[in-house]
Image (cartoon, rainbow, N blue to C red):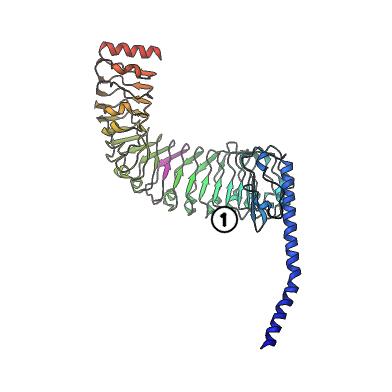
Amino acid sequence: MTIPTLTSSLHIHLCFLLFLPLLLISHANSQSLQDQEQAVLLKLKSYLQSPPFLSHWIPSTSNTSHCSWQPEITCTNNSVTGLSLVNTKITLPVPPFICDLKNLTLIDLSYNYFAGEFPKAFYNCSKLQYLNLSQNSFDGKIPDNIDSLPRLQYLDLSANYFSGDIPAAIGRLQELRNLQLYMNNFNGSVPPEIGNLSNLKHLSLSFNTKLVPWNLPSNFTKLKNLKNLYIRGSNLIGELPGTLGEMAALEELDLAYNSLNGTIPSVLFLLKNLSIIYLYNNSLSGDVPQVVEALNLTVIDISTNYLTGPIPQDYGNLTKLTWLALFLNGFSGAVPASIGRLPNLKQFRVFINNLSGTLPPDFGRYSELEGFEVSGNRLTGKLPDHLCYWGKLSTLVAYENNLTGELPSSLGNCTSLTEVKVYGNGLSGNIPSGMWTAPNLIHVLMSNNSLTGELPEKMSRNLTRLEIRDNRFSGNIPTGVSSWNLKVFDAESAYWLPSIRDYIMEITQRS
């Protein structure tokens, strides 16, 4: 029994002796790599003229490692894989030896003052996956061989001064998940090859105002994994392609501030994952799609277009909707009653349309309403009484309609209120007393109604504009008038006593 045991022990010992040189070589190589990386980092510190934020980059001892030089350095398996010099006010060029750190997968130089052309020194970072050069002063063209970084998954060149065409080579970066090119000086074209980036999830080309007018390439709709598409204010023209409905993963669409025309494709509102639609400030026309199956929508802003027809009844099924902006269009008919019962609606903005009928009475009862703007329509009946039920309402803008009845009683306890603009209606009755002292109240414009009552002793100290002319207010000048901070007071009316008419004239002359 002892012989096999001895043999086994000799075998293990022999294997260890044979493997020992490999361990020593591996350790030596590891040590050599660490020494090399530390030397590069210290060279980088010297190149940057030893700025204070790198004062902790001190040559390592046997008990420490340059991997502890955080937060600028990230290591994996004791080797530098990430370099982040963010918002450090660097004005020098990108160091040409930056890729002597052979294992870099991440470089973040955002929010600095780097300038010059795109640094081709990055091409020596063969493992680079994440490159962020945003918020700098780079200029010139993005190189036509940008695909020399084939492993890139994240590329952010936004908020620089890059010009010319966006190169077609970007479409060959097949690993890209996130491409940010917004806010540059591109004055050429956008390559349809971007539509070949099958792994892309986030794309922003917004605020490239100098681009040659361009149509949304039809093959952009091949981006089946795209979640966010932002092309705000970038000279888009033409019609929205019906193939947008093929972008099943789309969650956020922002094509605002362009020159798009034609109708909104009905398929857009069928996308199950869609949560945000910004199409405002375009030249879109026609009726909006009435069938809405995108039940995850939280924001719909299609304002400032030429859209017509009724507000879709299906909007009342969007229980996650927080923001509905349809203003400056040609919508007609009544506001669907179900919209007033949406549980998360905070902003309802439909001013300057052709809407008629009465407003749904439930507005504000089921959601923490913050903005209610319905001016410039042909609405009749009362303002909903629960607009400030949850104490969140900031703006009530309902001027130039045919509204009647009293102001909502909930305004009397609405400390969040900043603006009340209801002039040019047929409103009557007294003002809810607590409204005058709402601490944040700035503007009250209620002229040309039939409102009654007397001015209060106290006014909000922030109130600077009060316009109540051509109503039925009456009474004398309040004793607390000296504490009012009004800059504009327009209250011309035949019902005032002489003393308050004199005060109105005094305020007018003072302003």
Q: Is residue 493 left or right of residue 123?
A: left
Number of numbered discs:
1
Q: Which residues are magenta?
A: 279-304
Residue 181 position within the rendered picture, expressed as x and y whole percent measured from the top left: 59, 43
- The verdict on residue 403 being magenta is no
Report the amino acid beneath label 1. Asn
- The verdict on residue 283 being magenta is yes
Q: Residue at x 28, y 37 (%)?
A: 386
Residue 235 occupies which quadrant of the picture?
Answer: top right
Residue at the bottom extreme of this rendering: 1
Residue 381 seen in render:
no
Q: Which is more toward the observer, 407 or 223? A: 407
Residue 53 position within the rendered picture, expressed as x and y whole percent measured from the top left: 65, 41
Residue 415 position within the rendered picture, expressed as x and y whole percent measured from the top left: 34, 32
Residue 183 position within the rendered picture, expressed as x and y whole percent measured from the top left: 58, 39
Residue 322 occupies which quadrant of the picture?
Answer: top left
Is label 1 in a helix, a strand or a loop? loop
Q: Which is more toward the observer, 443 or 56? A: 56
Quarter of the C terminus within the rendering:
top left
Quarter of the N terminus within the rendering:
bottom right
* Dominant secondary structure of the residues highlighted in magenta in the image: loop
Rendered view: 267 above or below 463: below
Residue 323 occupies which quadrant of the picture?
Answer: top left
Q: Is residue 305 left or right of residue 333?
A: right
Q: Residues within 10 Å of mark 1 (few under 14, many from 20)?
A: some
Q: Residue at x 37, y 14 (%)?
A: 508
What residue does disc 1 label? 199
Q: Residue at x 35, y 39 (%)?
A: 369
Q: Is residue 418 left or right of residue 33?
A: left
